Image (spheres, grey):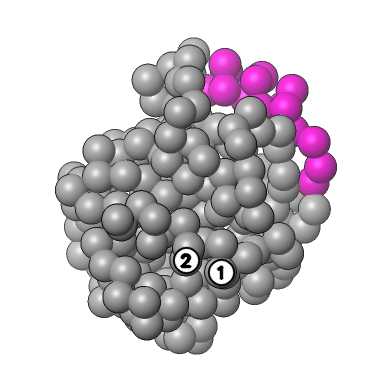
Amino acid sequence: MRKTYFISVVFLVLLVFSGCGFMYADSAPEREGVIDMSEVEREEDYQWRMPEFEAQNQYGELVTNKDTEGEKTLVKTIFTRCPTVCTTMTPNMVQIQEAMLREEIDGINIVSFTVDPEFDTPERLEEYAHSYGADLGNWTFLTGYEESFLTDELAPALFTVFQPVDNDILHPTRFYLFNEDGDIIRMYEGDESFNLDSVISDLKSLKN
């Protein structure tokens, strides 16, 4: 039921497909690549919330949604074979991570969910992380779940879709900031519209 409802609604608001990412209509206010989701109404409890999950990180260790509780979590979707927008989004997230360190913005962890869990083993994710210079001290790459988790849990939570197309997988090009209670409070543009200064300024305002 959840999957059917979700897919029908998302395809109604889906606007443009581009590479392995896409854009969709928003009802939340946006400024310079920052979308405030803190006051968005949730028609269903699972929308804009961290779903329950059990996964493996880049070291093969068990990670669950419980590990994200109590601190803010910045989430993005990736896959290591991504031929298009991931090559822009991942470096942009690295810029955020480095800027948070410089600006002493703590209490925010980064989590990347692969949308290709069958291929993306922990070893491949670790290699991918190192290839982009990600600091794995507060950045976790996740795999080890079934495809059904992506379609039935993560996609409805992010109000998006994951769709294989040729040698690509359509997935969102935004970064999602969850608060300590697991609610999405911000979305940040992650590709061509990415604005590092706006993101860092917003993260600072949430810290204060």
Query: Exactly how many numbered labels are in the figure?
Result: 2
Any mark on residue 28, and which?
none
Estimate the spatial distance between the alpha carbons at disc 1 and disc 2, rounded to whole Å. Answer: 5 Å
* Picture quadrant of residue 24: top right
Residue labelled with disc 1: 197
Judge left or right: residue 75 versus residue 71.
Answer: right
Q: Horizontal and vertical percent for residue 149?
A: 42, 38
Kindly identify the amino acid type of the residue bearing the numbered disc 2.
Ile
Q: Horizontal and vertical percent for residue 138?
A: 28, 70
Q: Residues within 10 Å of mark 1 (few under 14, many from 20)?
A: few
Residue labelled with disc 2: 200
Residue depicted at 42% across the width and 80% down the height: 98
Residue depicted at 23% across the width and 53% down the height: 71
Q: Horizontal and vertical percent for residue 116?
A: 52, 56
Q: Are marks 1 and 2 in contact (CB under 8 Å)?
A: yes
| Towards the viewer: 60 or 48 | 48
Instruction: Name the image quarter holding the C terminus.
Output: bottom left
Judge left or right: residue 76 versus residue 32.
Answer: left
Residue depicted at 35% across the width and 36% down the height: 183
**Residue 31 visible, this orientation:** yes
- Residue 15 in the magenta stretch? The answer is yes
| Towards the viewer: 111 or 144 | 111
Kindly identify the amino acid type of the residue bearing the numbered disc 1.
Asp
Q: Main secondary structure of the magenta part?
A: helix
Q: Residues within 10 Å of mark 2 (few under 14, many from 20)?
A: some
Q: Secondary structure at mark 2?
A: helix
**Residue 152 visible, this orientation:** no
Q: Which residues are magenta?
A: 3-17
Q: Secondary structure at mark 1?
A: helix
Judge left or right: residue 168 versus residue 106.
Answer: right
